[in-house]
Amino acid sequence: MHGNAMAAGGGDALDPASDSERDAVRRLAERLPRPARFLGVGGLGLITDLGSFTLVLNLGIPGLIARIVSLALATLVTWRLNRALTFDRSGRRQHREAVRYAAVTAAAQGTSYAIFAILTLTLLSRHPQAAIVIGAACSALISYNGHRLFAFAPVMRTHDRNIRSGEHS
């Protein structure tokens, strides 16, 4: 985890935080184990999800549509924070990493949304926020492992692939 000078911010030109500020935040975050960081980021994503869902729902938008909006906003928040604080840089360009993140997130958020939809159409029609929390808890395992093993997995060099497949140079 150490030695990732740009791990926290990704080197975005539009990112206002300086490299030293990002590095300081990253070093502080690295004191926690990765699963704890993931849960912390997920908690912020859940707050974003719940808050934006409630706001959109109160605008008169149907719950199933409001949830799509809130999931999209929460996904943006968690992608940036997971990239900054939870996982090491993969060695891929940011847009490629984002595509991989989106694939994992689609599976995890699809699970979360399906659970939400089933619960709000049946048992929890009066408590959609509770259905969000249950769906988020169920999808967390998919999300963590998918991001760890795929979205933010380090790029394997040819030599590493040969060793894993049993070939030697």
Image (cartoon, rainbow, N blue to C red):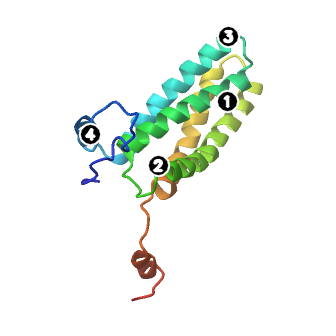
Q: Amino acid at mark 2?
A: Gln
Q: Amino acid at mark 3?
A: Leu
Question: Circle 2: is it few (<14), some (14-19), or many (20+) Cα within 10 Å?
Answer: some
For label 1, the residue is 68
Say which quarter of the image contains residue 164.
bottom left
Badge 2 vs badge 1, beta-carbon distance below 8 Å: no
What secondary structure is found at the residue carrying circle 4? Answer: helix
The image's mark for residue 19 is 4
The image's mark for residue 94 is 2
For label 3, the residue is 59
What secondary structure is found at the residue carrying circle 2? Answer: helix
Question: Circle 4: is it few (<14), some (14-19), or many (20+) Cα within 10 Å?
Answer: some
Q: Earlier in the sequence, mark 1 or mark 4?
A: 4
Q: CA distance from mark 4 to mark 2?
A: 17 Å
Q: Earlier in the sequence, mark 4 or mark 3?
A: 4
Q: Nearer the viewer, residue 159 or 123?
A: 159
Q: CA distance from mark 1 to mark 3?
A: 14 Å
**Left or right: 55 in relation to 45:** right
Q: x, y (%) of residue 111?
A: 65, 42
Q: Amino acid at mark 1?
A: Ile
Between circles 4 and 3, the one closer to the viewer is 4
What is the residue that sits farthest to the right in this orientation? 121
